[in-house]
Image (cartoon, grey):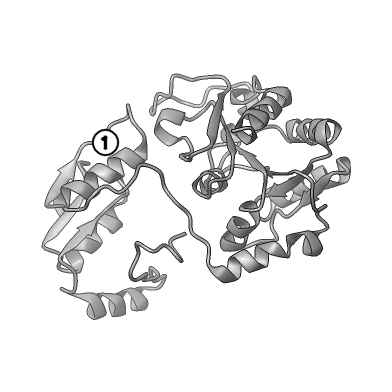
Amino acid sequence: VLVANPDVDHLVEFPRTLSERWQLLRRFFRRFDLSLSLSSRHVERAAWGMALGCRQRWGFNRPETRLFLTGRIEERRDRHWAEDYLELACLAGGKRNGDLPRFYLTPEEKAWAEELPARWGLRPGHLWIGVHVGASYPEKAWRPERFLELARLADEASGAQVIAFGGPGEEAATGDWLATQATNAVNLAGKLSLRDFAAAVSRCTAFVGGDSGPTHIAAALGVPTVGLYGFTDPTRMGPLGERVEVLLGLERHWDPNAQRLQESPYQWLDPISPEEVWKAIGRLTAR
């Protein structure tokens, strides 16, 4: 995600094996003055700052991570997670530079995206509506049938093509199903890396998705983005961007300790109709 970001000087890939982690510790021990732990409950990430010998170690005030930190802040559930992260960074000595996240592409990725029409059979000159057909768990997903209705509505209204994005497995199967049911749908789910997805979605006229990484990436790229929310709180986890609209389904008052008592996992987004989504796309693209 941070590749090509001009504010990042150096990226270190987190090692997977114990031997690689030991080598990383030896290489960077006492090379850093300060560490930030942006995961409130991840003990290992908080412990890395201490293991690397950082004198200042900032993070969230949680019982499981408190031991490893020299500076702490409280989570605030009345605001976006990004505000928590920014407060943490500023207390550690950073300076705030803008309110919205940005996702950057390399020149090579932009050139690759220019070839999308020829590579995937997209119609030049038409609207391209990207959709994320999955989610990390079903409560955050829109029914596949709703995406089909949206695709048909988009075709009838403007001749737009719908591009299905997602990971392998179930999401790819949903994308295949959508492409067989709607003549204006193209399935790229399970066919792209994360960076390729970002490059492809940067060419889209608009993007539709639930509370998921792809939705946040689309918004950070500046693509007009419609976020579908119900089970999770958009105030806390909504997409951030210059052209973003969030549609709310069935609210659950966003109690973090509430059990998932439900008749169907899709019930949280069921109140959101394809017509509402299409109207939101129209409002965003008209700006």
Per the image, the residue denoted by label 1 is 75
- Identify the residue shown where x is 73% and y is 65%: 115
Q: Is residue 206 left or right of residue 27?
A: right
- The amino acid on which the numbered mark 1 sits, given as a three-letter code, is Glu
Task: Place residue 14 in its image quadrant.
Answer: bottom left
Residue 147 picture location, percent across and down: 74, 35
Residue 261 picture location, percent across and down: 53, 22
Residue 107 picture location, percent across and down: 56, 69
Position of the C terminus, as image quadrant, is top right
Task: Place residue 98 in its image quadrant.
Answer: top left
- Identify the residue shown where x is 58% and y is 22%: 249
- Identify the residue shown where x is 47% and y is 35%: 238
Height in image: 264 above or below 106? above
Give SS at disc 1: loop
Height in image: 20 above or below 181? below
In the image shown, does 184 or 20 lie closer to the viewer? 184
In the image shown, does 60 or 217 lie closer to the viewer? 217
Residue 233 seen: no
